[in-house]
Amino acid sequence: MPKFLHTADWQMGRAFTRFETEDGAALVEARFEAIEKLAQLANEHQCDAVLVAGDVFDAQTVSDRTIRRVFNATKGFTGPWVMLPGNHDAALAESVWTRAQRLGAVPGNVHLALQPGIINLELQGLSILCAPLTQRHTYGDLTEPFSGYESPEGFPRIGLAHGSVQGLLHEEIDSSNPIAPDRADASTLDYLALGDWHGTKQINDRTWYSGTPEPERFRNNEAGNALIVEVSEPGATPKVTQLPTGRYQWHQWRETLAVHSDLEQLLERLNALPESAVVDLRLEGSVTLAGEETLLKALSVAEARFRSLRCERSGLQFAPTDEDIAALKADGYVGEVIESLRQGQGQEDTQDDAARDALAILAGMLREREQEASQ
């Protein structure tokens, strides 16, 4: 029974410049570790091959070191790897692939599908029908020729392509390269392994996107997996098993705070996240001064615990309660300033920001003064 691992969209060479240097470096390293994880899984599940459905590299201009490290990371699985160029690493006349070949970086067990056609894995009894991208964008279905490809009798026919299944995916998919939704049936494929959608997604019984093995975006689309595919015989419905591979979990939250329980629930959710979390948080609404102090302490703890935490609070207004003001012991002129800043938060954006920041600073100074006086 032929069995293989389906993966895609490694995007090697991607830089995470929006993160702190330390965090960005860790996210880059996790992508190399993901390849090693794929090799490990292929061995553990006794796979006959690993199929990579495009975008191994994030760009044609990745460094020679990145190229060498990618192929070095595959060495844990000595069976055949079949790598397909996608829209980020298309098989141009001069490409990252031709550079890899010149470097002598491609191991003998790695098959580069740089031309349309069939790669027959004789020992494994598999026919891989390949539709590589030879330019970044195409407007015709490159999988259409699959119908005319002849494969050895008894070999399961496995399609390998990179693009957008028409009419079924979100309009923000990476490339416009179209693929017919009935391609597996129309071309008598036992399985169609796809790349370009970065999350795991089943199109039908024979057509799947594996998604990227290591998440790299704030999208809730089931990223961070690989697929183990078993085909008992040509024509049989394949058995597909989803396996987690991602090290880091990416979370993007947009929260509105109105009452104290909103803040409590938010902090409970944050505390429940694992240390491998990468969090992008945007807060709106209002919070009391006491709530702001609680929030800042919790964010400080979370920043040290998570891989990365970024919190945008420009849409969050301070709404000091009478108890807040009393606790600050701000009377006379200082009390008048605080009241003025409270009212100033409802003004235009620049004034609103300045009033909020000034109120926070003043409240912090008053709390520090009170703490010093009590020592």
Image (tube, rainbow, N blue to C red):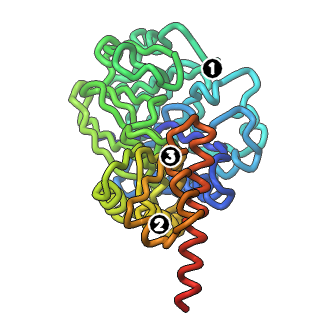
* 258 sits to left or right of 78: left
Pointer 2: residues within 10 angstroms few (<14), some, or many (20+)? some
Where is the C terminus found, in terms of image quarters? bottom right
Q: Residue furthest bottom?
A: 375
Under mark 2, the amino acid is: Glu
Tag on residue 343?
3
Residue 275 visible, this angle: no
Contact check, label 3 and label 2, Cβ < 8 Å:
no
Where is the N terminus found, in terms of image quarters? top left
Q: Find residue 236 and report its horizontal and vertical position in percent.
A: 21, 29
Tag nearer the camera, 2 or 1: 2
Q: Is residue 191 above or below residue 256?
A: above
**What is the CA distance from the residue labelled 2 to the residue labelled 1?**
50 Å
Task: Identify the element where label 2 is drawn.
Answer: helix
Q: Is residue 166 above or below residue 331?
A: above
**What is the CA distance from the residue labelled 3 to the residue labelled 1?**
54 Å
Under mark 3, the amino acid is: Gln
**Front one among 90 and 259:** 259
Under mark 1, the amino acid is: Arg
Which residue bears the numbered disc 2?
A: 293
Q: Residue at 54% x, 53% y: name it.
A: 310
Tag nearer the camera, 3 or 2: 3
Task: Identify the element where label 3 is drawn.
Answer: helix
First of labels 2, 1 by sequence position:
1
Which residue bears the numbered disc 1?
A: 136
Q: Find residue 10 and report its horizontal and vertical position in percent.
A: 54, 41
First of labels 3, 1 by sequence position:
1
Q: Residue at 73% x, 37% y: name it.
A: 101
Contact check, label 2 and label 1, Cβ < 8 Å:
no
Q: Residue at 38% x, 22% y: name it.
A: 169
Task: Identify the element where label 1 is drawn.
Answer: loop
**Front one among 126 and 95:** 95
